[in-house]
Image (tube, rainbow, N blue to C red):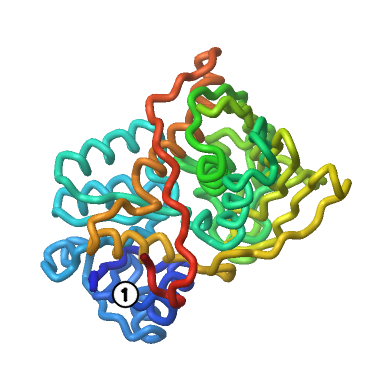
Amino acid sequence: MTKIGIIGCGAISGIYLTNLTKLFKEIEIAGVCDLIPERAQKARDEYGVEIYKDMYEIFSDKSIGLILNLTRPYEHFDVDMAAIEAGKHVYSEKPLGADWEEGQKILAAANAKSVLVGGAPDTFMGAGIQTCRKLIDDGYIGKPVGATAFMTCRGHESWHPDPEFYYKFGGGPMMDMGPYYITALVNLLGAVETVSGFAGVSFPTRTITSRARYGEIVKVEVPTNIHGVMRFKSGAIGTIITSFDVHRANLPIIEIYGSEGTLQVPDPNTFGGPVRLFRPERGEFLEFPLMFGYSENSRGLGLADMSKAIETGRKPRAHIDITSHALEIITGFVRSDNAGYHLELTTCPDRPQPMVNGLLPGILD
C-alpha cells in the first residue's frame, strides 16, 4: 500500500481527503502540510491525519512514496520539482505547469530521476466520459469527424473568496478549465497534432464582489477569452472556447460528431452526468445509461490509479504524457496567437487505457 504526503490544504483538499480516507482502499495518507497552519490543523481535526511542518519534512520521510500537490497553479512547478529531486513520485492538481516551459522542465526532471509524474484532471476516468469513450470505440457514432467544447462564464470574482489568482500568471479560463475539456477530448479522440488560436483580454480590471475581498480591483494579466482549433492525429477537427467574459450562453458542453451520429458528453468537470446519443434512425437525442463506476465526485481516483500503477508496474492513466500534452495544447492556443501561425505539437501520447468494470468500489486494476 502506497503512503502519500499531501502538500496544500486549501479548498480542493476536502474532497481529496474525504475520498482518500473513505472510498479508495489501497492508499494511506501519511500526513499533510500547509503554509497556513490552521488549514493543516483543520485537516487533522476532520480526518485524523498527521501534520508535517513543511514539504521538506514530508520529502525526508522515507515511508512516503507519492506526493499529492494541491498548491495553487503557479506553485505547482516549484513543489513538483522539489519532490522529484527528493526521488518521490508526484501527482499534481491541474495544470501541470503555469506555462509550457515549466511543463517541459518537470517532464525532463521526472525522466532524469526515473519517477512517475501525473495529475488532474481525473474526471475522464469517471462514469460519464468512460461511457462516452465506449460508445465511440464501439462505433455508435461511426468515424469521429469533429468536436466542439465550450466553457463560458463571467469570471469567478462574484463567488470565489480569493479569486485574484485566476487573473494572474498561470490563471485564465483555458488554464483553469481547459485541462478538463482537453483531457476529455484526448481520451475520446486521441492526440492532437496541430493547434491554432486567438486570445484576448476584454476587461483590463476586475472588481471582486465576493464577501471576503469585496470591492478590491484586480488587474487582469492573462487572456480571458480564448478560441482554439485543433486537428487531431485521427483527422478529426475540434473547436474550443473558454471565456471569463460571457454573461450567459446557450452552448453545448462537449459534442462529438461522427459519420453515423452525434454524442453529447457530460460536463468534464464532473465524473458522471447525462450522456446523450443521436442516431439518425431515431431522429432525436436519447439519454444513454452510464456503464462504469465513479459517477459521483471521485477526485483522487487518478491518484489511487497512480498508486496502484506504482505497485503493479503498469502506466498510470493520468500519466504526465497526458498532462503535458494537455498543457502543450492549452498554452498552444495563446502561443499560436502570439506567433501568428498554426502550432505543430511536440507531444503525441497514446490514449489512456479504459477503465475496468466489475471491480469493488475503491479498488483499481
Image quadrant in which you'd find residue 25:
bottom left
Identity of the residue drawn at 23% across and 56% down: 313
According to the picture, the residue beneath numbered tag 1 turns out to be 26
Residue type highlighted by circle 1: Glu
Image quadrant in which you'd find residue 273:
bottom right
Q: Is residue 175 visible?
A: no
Give left or right: position of 18 versus 315.
Answer: right
Give left or right: position of 164 versus 64.
Answer: right
Q: Nearer the viewer, residue 350 or 226?
A: 350
Identity of the residue drawn at 49% across and 66% down: 357
Classify 259 as above or below 338.
below
* Total residue callouts: 1
Q: Is residue 286 visible?
A: yes
Quarter of the image with the C terminus is: bottom left
**Residue reaching furthest right?**
283
Q: Position of residue 7 (x, y in %)?
A: 31, 63
Q: Nearer the viewer, residue 170 or 208?
A: 170
Identity of the residue drawn at 37% across and 86% down: 45
Classify 350 as above or below 28.
above
Q: Position of residue 147 (x, y in %)?
A: 66, 36
Is disc 1 surrounded by few (<14), some (14 to 19) or many (20+) residues within 10 Å? some
Q: Position of residue 52 (x, y in %)?
A: 22, 73
**Residue reaching furthest top?**
340
Identity of the residue drawn at 23% across and 46% down: 81
Q: Secondary structure at mark 1?
A: loop
